[in-house]
Image (tube, helix red, strand yellow):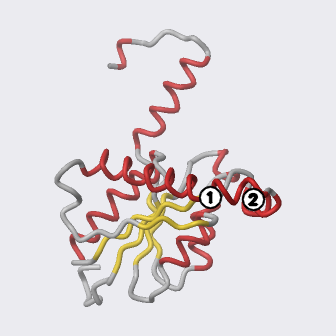
């Protein structure tokens, strides 16, 4: 980006779910917003349990929509607080809660050509074929540039620890 003139992005929109991949994407989006002089828009998409079709069929679901929305707002605030702490991100920020599927919600939010959409790229390896649907949707449908952030190198270590614990194997202290 430094070799030629690029217009500053008005907004850097980033998908946030609380997963390790979304946290990595949030950190990258924050750095980009700082460098571009843009506003940071962390977006948490939520759907009623069972999806909107199930919620429309259930009369009780209408009463719970406000509670689900409150919980989504609470989760986004918790993730942002955990990542940025008291001092905040250091750039102007507008946190957004959107009802809908994550891919569609992110594309609908990043609806300007001057926006930059940042998403986690999902898992690597054989299981990737069944993951990364949000990333693929955004890459296919967005009207703005999309940055797919690869998983953190620590993610493979975390998966290895979980696998070792699931099989009740001892930890090799020589690796520490």
Query: 125 or 91, which lies in front?
Result: 91
Image location (x, y in percent) of residue 35: 21, 72
Q: Quadrant of the N terminus?
A: bottom left
Crowding near pointer 2: few (<14 within 10 Å), some, many (20+)? some
Q: Residue at x 54, y 19 (%)?
A: 164
Pointer 1: what residue?
65
Task: Tell me which label, 1 or 2, sits earlier in the chain.
Answer: 2
- Give me the C-alpha separation between circle 1 and circle 2: 9 Å
Position of 55 with respect to 136 (left or right) is: right
Q: Residue at x 40, y 82 (%)?
A: 115
Tag 1's secondary structure? helix
Is 6 located above or below residue 107 in the figure? below
Pointer 2: what residue?
55
Marks counted in the figure total 2
| Disc 1 and disc 2 in contact, CB within 8 angstroms | yes
Position of 38 with respect to 41 (left or right) is: left
Q: Residue at x 56, y 52 (%)?
A: 67
Tag 2's secondary structure? helix
Image location (x, y in percent) of residue 91: 21, 68
Q: Residue at x 55, y 76 (%)?
A: 107
Crowding near pointer 1: few (<14 within 10 Å), some, many (20+)? some
Position of 138 with respect to 75 (left or right) is: right
Image location (x, y in percent) of residue 158: 46, 32
Image location (x, y in percent) of residue 134: 60, 63
Query: 90 or 155, which lies in front?
Result: 90
Q: Quadrant of the C terminus?
A: top left
Task: Say the numbered circle drawn on residue 116.
Answer: none
């Amino acid at each position: 980006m430094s070799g030629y003139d690029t217009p500053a992005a008005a907004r850097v929109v980033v998908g946030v779910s609380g997963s390790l991949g979304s946290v990595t994407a949030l950190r990258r989006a924050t750095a980009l917003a700082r460098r571009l002089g843009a506003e940071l828009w962390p977006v948490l998409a939520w759907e009623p349990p069972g999806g909107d079709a199930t919620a429309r069929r259930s009369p009780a679901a209408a009463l719970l929509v406000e509670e689900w929305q409150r919980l989504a707002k609470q989760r986004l605030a918790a993730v942002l607080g955990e990542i940025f702490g008291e001092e905040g991100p250091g750039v102007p920020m507008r946190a957004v809660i959107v009802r809908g599927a994550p891919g569609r919600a992110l594309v609908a939010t990043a609806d300007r050509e001057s926006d930059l959409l940042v998403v986690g790229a999902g898992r690597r390896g054989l299981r990737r074929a069944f993951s990364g649907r949000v990333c693929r949707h955004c890459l296919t449908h967005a009207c703005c540039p999309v940055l797919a952030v690869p998983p953190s190198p620590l993610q493979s270590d975390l998966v290895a620890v979980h696998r070792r614990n699931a099989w009740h194997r001892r930890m090799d202290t020589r690796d520490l």
